[in-house]
């Protein structure tokens, strides 16, 4: 793996800490801002919504800008957004700072993913994305629990200041270690890149990613109150349990990244099915502290086990537009990160309790399994059509009219074959299946 890919993973650590740390400081924010926990949970949805809008928008807007310069600008804006959040005097200002931070985060993910994919061979795409997503996993292992620890000891604003410092460190890494990437000889054409949205497989990938992510984060966003109010754990245990979720995420990303290149659909189906089982178990056994802790680890594993495959799948079906492919994956993940917490908040407001968020999440992941099955069926059908087309292009060796030797194509009156028509290019139908 090129060093630049690891630097991108380091930057993602700061982005991921900010994105997910609210799950550990949600009650503190609600108390300080005088809002309900579901209202505070909308801050998570605000970040996700900013990512959904910002990823494709900034990807198209920066298509013709130098990649390194774009990354520097985006991580700088993100860091300033953390400072604004730390100083926010009202809920509205904090909400706005989350949206601005999310826009910058989305752009960095989209451009960074395209850079990472472009630095490695096609056969290592999932592993490259696993390195970037590894930064997100480490954020869950270290950053999110640290944010909860700071929030518990020094107030929730301290967590925002800490992410601001991490963003500054990431900025130094990008400036000093990301190489200058020359613009392509042919200028990117936004209209051509936007054509990927005509492909039904792209929309299926968006659906699967959004539902798989949303299902897990429907419950994870309210994990802190579930642990304290339902499982009966002391608040001091929350950072430890969040760290366990992160450890599971790191292990899942590592395993999934190594397996997904060879067994992409197998990883998707098994990982999403596992998330469904764990969510249902959390809904049923959430009152047990031991079960809640163990299931937090398992949910982290299953959620991030599928992440490299979800990313690689989008790049496979939208390979003609790598920047928009990365942006679309980012938007899809955060569509789930927006819809999941919103659905969880609606369930809580309906008086169904915190365990019901896991039932709602399981409903989303079951739907994701169905969408994955449809995508697999279409993939197999397309592969059969392509294989059939390739076979038609292969000449029959038993056919006397089918020349087997290039010498047979030569005109005896033209021994050097100077007047013979050029052979046709390989059939486009022989392109590898997506």
Image: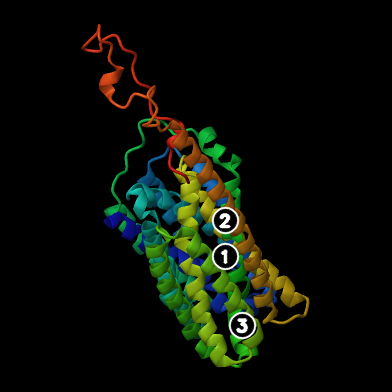
Q: Is residue 222 above or below residue 98?
A: below
Quick check: 141 left or right of 61? left
Between discs 3 and 2, the one toward the N terminus: 3
Q: CA distance from mark 3 to mark 1?
A: 18 Å
User: Residue shown at 61%/82% (left/top)?
Assistant: 282
Q: Is residue 421 above or below residue 433?
A: above
Closer to the camera in the image, 337 or 82? 337
Residue 207 picture quarter: bottom right
Quadrant in which the N terminus appears: bottom left
Q: Position of residue 37 (x, y in %)?
A: 67, 77
Q: Disc number at residue 281?
A: 3
Residue 11 appears in the rendering? no
Between discs 2 and 1, the one toward the N terminus: 1
User: Residue shown at 30%/44% (left/top)?
Assistant: 180
* Label 2 residue SS: helix
Tag 2 residue: 332
| Badge 3: residue crowd in 10 Å (few <14, some 14–19, many ≥20) | some
* Label 1 residue SS: helix
| Badge 2: residue crowd in 10 Å (few <14, some 14–19, many ≥20) | many
Quick check: 21 left or right of 398? right
Quick check: 130 left or right of 102? left
Tag 1 residue: 213
């Amino acid at each position: 793996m090129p060093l630049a890919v690891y630097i991108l993973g380091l930057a993602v650590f700061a982005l991921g800490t900010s994105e997910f740390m609210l799950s550990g400081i949600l009650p503190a924010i609600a108390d300080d801002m005088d809002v309900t926990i579901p209202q505070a949970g909308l801050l998570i949805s605000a970040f996700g919504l900013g990512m959904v809008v910002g990823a494709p928008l900034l990807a198209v807007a920066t298509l013709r800008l130098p990649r390194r310069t774009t990354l520097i600008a985006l991580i700088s804006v993100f860091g300033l957004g953390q400072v604004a959040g730390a100083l926010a005097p009202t809920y509205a200002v904090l909400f706005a700072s989350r949206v601005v931070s999310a826009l910058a985060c989305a752009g960095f993910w989209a451009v960074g993913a395209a850079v990472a994919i472009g630095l490695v061979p096609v056969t290592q795409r999932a592993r490259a994305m696993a390195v970037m997503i590894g930064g997100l996993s480490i954020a869950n292992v270290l950053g999110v629990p640290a944010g909860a620890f700071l929030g518990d000891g020094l107030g929730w604003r301290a967590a925002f200041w800490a992410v601001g410092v991490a963003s500054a460190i990431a900025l130094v890494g990008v400036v000093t270690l990301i190489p200058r990437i020359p613009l392509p000889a042919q200028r990117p054409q936004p209209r051509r890149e936007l054509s990927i949205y005509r492909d039904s497989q792209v929309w299926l990938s968006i659906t699967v990613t959004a539902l798989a992510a949303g299902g897990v984060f429907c419950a994870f966003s309210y994990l802190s109150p579930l642990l304290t109010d339902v499982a009966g754990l002391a608040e001091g245990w929350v950072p430890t349990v969040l760290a366990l979720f992160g450890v599971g995420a790191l292990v899942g990303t590592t395993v999934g990244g190594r397996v997904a290149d060879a067994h992409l659909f197998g990883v998707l189906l098994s990982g999403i099915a596992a998330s469904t089982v764990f969510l249902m178990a959390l809904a049923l056994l959430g009152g047990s502290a031991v079960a809640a802790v163990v299931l937090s680890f398992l949910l982290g594993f299953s959620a991030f086990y599928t992440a490299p495959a979800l990313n690689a799948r989008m790049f496979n079906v939208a390979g003609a537009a790598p920047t928009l492919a990365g942006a679309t994956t980012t938007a899809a993940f955060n569509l789930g990160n927006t819809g999941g917490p919103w659905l969880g908040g609606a369930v809580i407001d309906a008086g169904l309790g915190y365990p019901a968020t896991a039932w709602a999440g399981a409903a989303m992941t079951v739907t994701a399994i169905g969408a994955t099955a449809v995508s697999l069926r279409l993939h197999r059908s397309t592969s059969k059509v392509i294989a059939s087309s390739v076979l038609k292009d292969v000449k029959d060796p038993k056919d006397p009219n089918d020349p087997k030797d290039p010498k047979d194509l030569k005109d005896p009156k033209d021994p050097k074959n100077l007047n013979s028509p050029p052979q046709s290019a390989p059939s486009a139908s022989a392109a590898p299946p997506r």
